[in-house]
Amino acid sequence: MAGRVYNEIQPVAGDYAVAKRTEDIPVVEKILERTSFLQRASAKRTSAQVIAANVDMVLVIMSIKMPDFTEGFLSRALVAAEWMNLKALIVLNKIDLCGKQEETLTDRILSTYGPRGAGYPLLKTSCITGRGTEALLKKISGFTVVMTGPSGAGKTSLVKYYNPALNVKIGKLNPRTSKGRHTTVSARLIPLEKNTDLIDTPGFRLFSIDHIPRTELQFCFPEFKDYTGKCKFRDCLHVSEPECAVKMAVENSVILKKRYEMYLNFMNE
């Protein structure tokens, strides 16, 4: 790649480029304008990091166990998807490890984030038993999909399940911390059948959303949308303002109190 191009825009998985052959070596001359992308705040929280470009959907892959489910990661990843107007699908992976305790947790996640809660489609999958994998493939068929999730949640295992011939490394959990280890060091695009592309990304410990302006955070909670603009004050942030339509919806149990409290936590960060 020409250095000039790299200085103009740092390419990521999913980018389209114009290239020219020079002595049988393709040299990228231009990165085409992105139609969409997913980003998070950088590790130092000084800038936004683009994770993948030209995507149609975000799969938030969460394991129920090994490693344990982390609600903060899920909520932040969904907010980041909403900020870029990207469809999001929650995948609860490693469902084969679920006992009665984990089933209770799964039901709680479904009631909070599923169709009767925040409104997101949610699928349960297992790369061991194959449960839910066909349904997931149908959901993403024909789309370019970026997967994000904590290390060890099973993103690369899902890629391997759909494309067994792919030479990818699948890591084991740290036996001391029961947390995942990074095996995917950079994002990569894996083509599947029927014009479907999966972008596998490195696992993150935290999905930071510091790049989203505080005043815009309310638009990243889909259950707020029917109430924003109906408050007494036009610039209402739904925190301490009087006659707030969102807060009234929470009081009337139309919006889940737990989700509203998550919104307040993000506002205070």
Image (cartoon, rainbow, N blue to C red):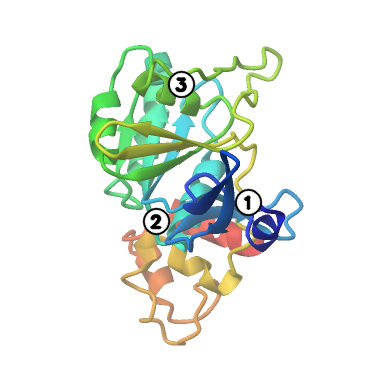
* Secondary structure of residue under mark 3: helix
Report the disc number at residue 208. 1
Q: Earlier in the sequence, mark 1 or mark 3?
A: 3
Q: Nearer the viewer, mark 1 or mark 3?
A: 3
Relative image position of residue 219 (x, y in whole percent): 44, 68
Q: Earlier in the sequence, mark 2 or mark 3?
A: 2
Amino acid at the residue labelled 1: Ser
Q: CA distance from mark 2 to mark 3?
A: 24 Å
Amino acid at the residue labelled 3: Ser
Residue sitting at x 55%, y 59%: 30
Circle 3 residue: 157
- Could you tell me if residue 126 is visible in this image? no
Residue 92 vertical placement versus 87 (above, below): above
Q: Nearer the viewer, residue 17 or 115?
A: 17
Residue sitting at x 24%, y 26%: 134
Q: Nearer the viewer, residue 51 or 66?
A: 51
Amino acid at the residue labelled 2: Leu
